Amino acid sequence: MSTPFAPAGVDYAESRLHELRKTRMVMVDGNLTANSETTEGGSSARVFEKGYWGFASTPAMDDDAIQKVAKKATENARTMCRFGAQPSLDLPKESHQGEYGYNGRPPISQSEAIDLLESLNAHCREKYPTLKSASFMMQQENHEKRLATSNGSAGLSTINRSAFYIIFSAEDKDGRPVELMEAISGRGNLSDLQLSMDGLEARMDELHGHLMAKCNAVAPRGGKQTVIIAPPLAGMLAHEAMGHPCEADLVLGGAVTGNLVGKPVASELVTMVDLANTYQGEELMIPVYIDDEGTEAKDVTLIDKGILKSFMSSRETAARLGIPATGSARAYTFNDEPLVRMRNTAILPGHSKLEDMIAGVEDGYYLLQTGNGQADSTTEFMFGITLAYEIKNGKIGNAIKDTTVSGTAIDMLKTVDAVSDDMHWECNGYCGKKQPMVVSLGGPALRAQIHLGGE
Amino acid sequence: MMSTDVNSTAEMALAEMSKAGFDEAQVSVSVSEQDELNINHNEPSLLRSTEDYAISLTGIVDGRKAAMALTDISPHAIESGIAELIERARIAPRDDANAVSENQVGHFEQGPLAADLDLLALKVEELLHFRSRETPKMQLEEGAASHRISRECVMTSGGSKLGCTVGAYSLSVMGTAIDGDASSSFNYTGGTANDLSQAHASELFAIGEMMRDTEQQIHTRSIPAKFVGDVILAPTAVRDLLGWLLGQLQDFSLIADNSLYKDRVGEQIASDKLTIRSHFDAPGHAPYTGDAFLAPALTLLDAGRLTCLVPSYYASRKTGLPHTPASSGWQIEPGPTERSAMISDIKQGALVNRLSMGSPAANGDFSGVIKNSFYIEGGNLSGALSETMIAGNMANMLGDIVAVSKEHLDQGGTDFPWISVSGLNFS
């Protein structure tokens, strides 16, 4: 990689070199249906001049390419002046310098990966004869970015995350397909997930048990229900329901959170944060030390004991809202401009024991797994539930069929009456917002009232 | 950059793959340029110019396959990539279903091959003037007018040579309507076309209608009680129904033997009101597949009868199912019913513009929140809905279609009418 240099003579500029490597292998019932590696790299420049932005990118990282995109981005910002004068906007001027690499385990070799996939497939064929299909997917992506800005920021940052998926399907008593997925994810390469047959056998036994229960699933009752939201779902809830509406660009776009700072939006038991890189002394799954605008990444407390506190921001959105820039501006590939994105978003643990929380539910549901989720500027959210059980008189009952939960976060979070003392982090999947983005989600279990789809 | 000779680069890479020892190979070289004028918070904000080039290499040796994609298309990078690729392929498990296409030849050109920045700026100005004049409560959080041109050459060792030079314009907006402290759900629409100059920006892809509707969705109501009723799916929501159906007819479901329709070709699987045709030559598209097969026009559902499955060449060889190449771009044939008549015919239900939900279950069961949607009572629209869910089964919905509208919305890759479906659970 060359060294980026930001165009001069403009109000603000940044230059970024960005390489992204991906590995993907998929085995469906013993067939290796995907076995690919992708490497994409390039340089980009973004310029702010007289209230307008210009951006340019090219898939090359030499000095000529860096100069070319700097010139084009400057031209583009100036071309925007055709729309007339803009009010002046002073972007925050803080700068940061630092190099943040990652020293993980040596990458898993392709032959080791294929051996593992074939062993897992053979194991499933032998141990789970009622299984109709077993699929496994391995994904790894490694980002390396070098950045320079016109106000003196310079940095190297790396994001490395891996995910391993197990997808089982069987048939219910009527011969209809039933499916479940388990995802294991973490920071670093696939080798850092420490996937071993012993460890995976236990995960597959558990997944198979849930699948068999789901083959006899009952329909949930639609409407408002008391639920225990398992930690992986609480992380999704944090991200979707309150995370997005606390992104400063969405606030500027009219998210209802804009008028709620200092007001209660959740139970006093709820504290929610977007962490930059570290939690309790441990580096998080998506560690961001310097963002793609050269701002030092800082933790953001979104909700403190139920009170809405602050928003995640870029330089521009910070200037527009009169708040500090939090180091949340990130771009997914070299040809993307930085947008306000979450990093490691979590509801922090409380003091309750999960088993006590379940025991305290007379008639409700235990929601364990989600497929995906979406949020709205109103804090209205939904997420698909792919694994859940009834709770009857404090005990786990029948599995229920796939459903969806929804609500308005600022109403639903006020119903939280217990937060467990454990914490689960994961970083599989992508957050979508014009560009995809790798993020991590964290949470304890929550007990709350939520709207459940069903009959 | 657009002067890069994609054909000679592909030829060179294919020759190198043969020299390296691959029995069969496929190479795809593409170059593209995009200019995108962005709106943020009701103002023109950013002009973005990107150029991209990439090479994709797929090699098979002794029935073993591996693939690689690179943005560095220099001869040295391609040579290194091929050396690594053959090592990766040799380690992969042997699979006799692996093969590349043979003797597929074609070149396709369409659309404007150069960006008209003045036109992009005009469309942005039209959108912003429309917003301030007609829908001032609508806050355009994001919007973009863009032009993209791409050239591609795909070659295989089996003698296939496919390529395209495609240019197209796109226009899109996303935002929320605000009235004091009250706010609508966010809403969005957009599309791709070969020409944006023929109509005002607000009239393209129903953008103006979406912005007007969103202003009507600031103040919402809930449904009075749970009920079983009808929905009219707007084209934007019809996409979810088609997406689920295509998933059932493609590789993963067919190889995993989870498809509800694997053995139902030739049978009636949907209402006879539903006819789905390909639109593989839609603006911005070219009629060939990623595995290098020409994709002739096809009718997927003919008056509700399933005519074929659409596995890739690999999935076809793996499962023994007939191979029907399918690229992207679909049309649903409009029906005889006016949208207004479809609304009049519904006693209780909703006009659904967006379904917010997880992936439907493997058996088609789903439940989702209906967004940007209006309650229908006694044949009349009666206010925007919030916090309302519908639940049903995708396969059943295909059979429960009661009307298809005369009106349709062409967004480029999709051209769909409004579709009325009975028997959904509202809660």
Image: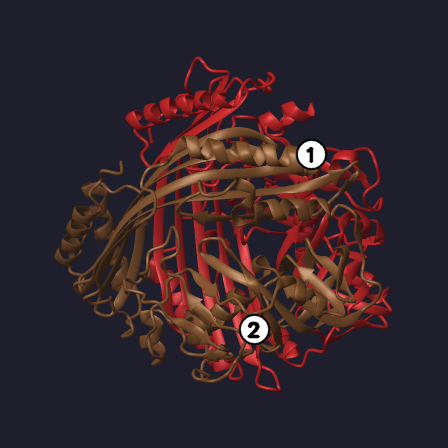
Mark 1 residue type: Phe
Residue, x 75% and y 64% (percent of image)?
A: A452
Q: CA distance from mark 2 to mark 1?
A: 38 Å
Q: Are marks 2 and 1 on the same chain?
A: no
The tint of chain A in the picture is red
The tint of chain B in the picture is brown
- Residue A258 percent location from the top left of the image: 74, 35
Which part of the image, by quadrant, shows the C terminus of chain A? bottom right
Which part of the image, by quadrant, shows the N terminus of chain A? top left
Residue B362, numbered label:
2
- Residue A53 percent location from the top left of the image: 50, 25
Residue in the foreground of this view, choosing between A9 and A76: A76
Colouring method of the image: by chain
Q: Is residue A129 left or right of residue A264?
A: left
Q: Which residue is mark 1?
A: A311
Residue in the foreground of this view, choosing between A349 and B98: B98
Q: Secondary structure at mark 1?
A: loop
Residue, x 64% and y 71% (percent of image)?
A: B421
Q: Is residue A418 above or below residue A302?
A: below
- Residue A165 percent location from the top left of the image: 51, 62
Q: Alpha-carbon neighbours of circle 1 within 10 Å: few (<14), some, or many (≥20)?
A: many
